Amino acid sequence: MEENRRFRNHVSVVAERVGAGTYALLAVLAGIFIQNADELLDVGGSLLADRRALLGLFICLGLLAVSLGKAMWTWSKTWISIQDQAIVIDKHTLNGSQNTIGIRNISNINLEQNLFEMLMGTCKVKLDTGSLSTANSTDVTIVLKKAKAEAFRAEVESLLRGERAAAAAPGEEEETYDFRAGSGDIIRHGVCSMSVLSLLAVILGLVGAVVMAAEALGEEHVLDSLLRSAVSFLAAIAIILSAVWDIVKDFVRYLDFRVKRQRDRICIRYGVLKKVEYTIPVDMIQALKLRQTLIARLLGKYMAEIVNVGMGDDKGEQNSFLILYGSEREVCEKLRTILPEFVDIAALQVQRQPRSAWAAWMWPLAIYEICLAVAGALAFLWLPGYVPAEYIQLYHRVAAAGLVLLAAAGPVVLALRYQSSGFVMSDGFVKAASGCFGRRVVAVRYANVQHVTLEQNFIARACGICKGTLHLLAGAGDMAQTLPYFDIRQADRMRERMCGRHSDRGHL
């Protein structure tokens, strides 16, 4: 792909952009026909017999035509080119614009292909820059034929490295992947990724559906009872299906997962129904995360993720993954190949919070217990007046059990946080662990910290400890990383190391 040569998005981008609007219009049209179903049936089902339905059809078709015409006009007037180490997107519409992306600022070059694009032979090229203002969305999306998309990516990568683009030999890409997940790896990752809350939602939803069905079948007019319960059944089914998808999505999302290190960049590829390829410059990686769900902690498994502007910024792709769930030894071995810059800090154990952290927690815990005591007083002194007499004994038992569980939950949660959290500093990194049932460990270079916020309540100040937040250049989900309680004297060491590396960017 020659520099300064202008080209357009593939024309199929028009269908993709109009598609969502088409579905909405069809839904509106279906609603019109459903509302007028009785009248349509009265006249023998003729569409022309009802003017309102016909008018609705013309309006929907007109709106669709306008949307299609606008999308075609925008497509025909939008040109893309590479000029002077920058990607330039010109829109020569009525309200013309020019978007210029400096190639040296690009943090990610990603390829994505959904089912429609597979059929069309096209592919999305997604470009992200290291900019805080656009950290939560993709900066540029370009749709091209698959071969042209790969050539465009190769051209941009070569400019990033200051080299001439070289064509890959057939089969070279397939052979050079360092790790490729098998079926056992995918199953293990799916099991470790499962949410306990989603499992409980499925179980409770199924129990509720069975109870409602049993009650309906036990009544005299079964059909009428089932019809009256239809809305409840549908709501229960929607909850169950949503929870089931939350459980099984990681079993299918990362099929054909593979990753490799190529000099100064990491390439990640996965997906069958939706194919995604990430290319991440190593120097754009802000931090490394080791994540564990509750199930993963019980099984002793870890998942490695990276914090990088551009990974995980789409709604459907919140996890900025790097290595799928495996044992600690397996993860470290893969890190040694894929991201050796972080392997030493990943293996370094964090130091548990000072015991004085318990004293600092006493103040918020006391407030929680006082609020709970007030709520309990209301539950036993005021609310019983609204409970029927035959249920008052059951109400008191349930209220008492609930208050006891909530009162015990506070100390239990703090104990779990104390066991899960920790902090350690090395020459080039700061590493912090946090969590309660699950656990997350984050390792950050001092040079990548934008700023640090430290906090102390009056008890922590007296104990000489503090907690805080590391702020990174990343999406909203990764922008703030928690620091648990640590000795205040370590804050001075952190300040010295941050300021010694980049005094213009980091401050406490």
Image: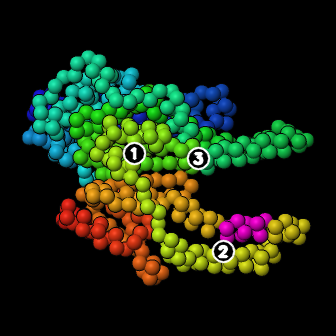
x%, y% of residue 436? Answer: 54, 58
Residue 204 lies left or right of residue 295; in this view the side is right
Q: Is residue 298 above or below residue 4?
A: below
Nearer to me, 108 or 409: 409
Q: Nearer the viewer, mark 3 or mark 1?
A: 3
Residue under pointer 2: 372
Q: Which mark is residue 298?
A: 3
Q: Residue drawn 76% across and 78% down? A: 382
Segment tinted magenta in the rendering: 398-408
Q: Residues within 10 Å of mark 3 (few under 14, many from 20)?
A: few
Give residue 177's position: percent from left, percent from top. Answer: 33, 27
Q: Earlier in the sequence, mark 2 or mark 1?
A: 1
User: In the image, what residue type sits under mark 2?
Assistant: Leu
| C-alpha separation, residue under disc 2 versus residue under disc 1 | 38 Å
Residue 111, image quadrant: top left
Contact (Cβ within 8 Å) of mark 2 with mark 1: no
Q: Is residue 209 visible?
A: yes
Q: Secondary structure at mark 1?
A: strand
Q: Quadrant of residue 241?
A: top right
Given residues 249 and 505, the one toward you in this image is: 505
Where is mark 1, residue-wise? 305
In the image, taking residue 7 as reference, residue 58 lies left or right, namely: right
Q: Which amino acid, mark 3?
A: Leu
Instruction: Count neighbours of disc 2 (C-alpha within 10 A) and say few if under 14, some if 14 to 19, many if 20 or more.
Output: some
Q: CA distance from mark 3 to mark 1?
A: 20 Å
Query: Tag 1: residue type?
Result: Glu
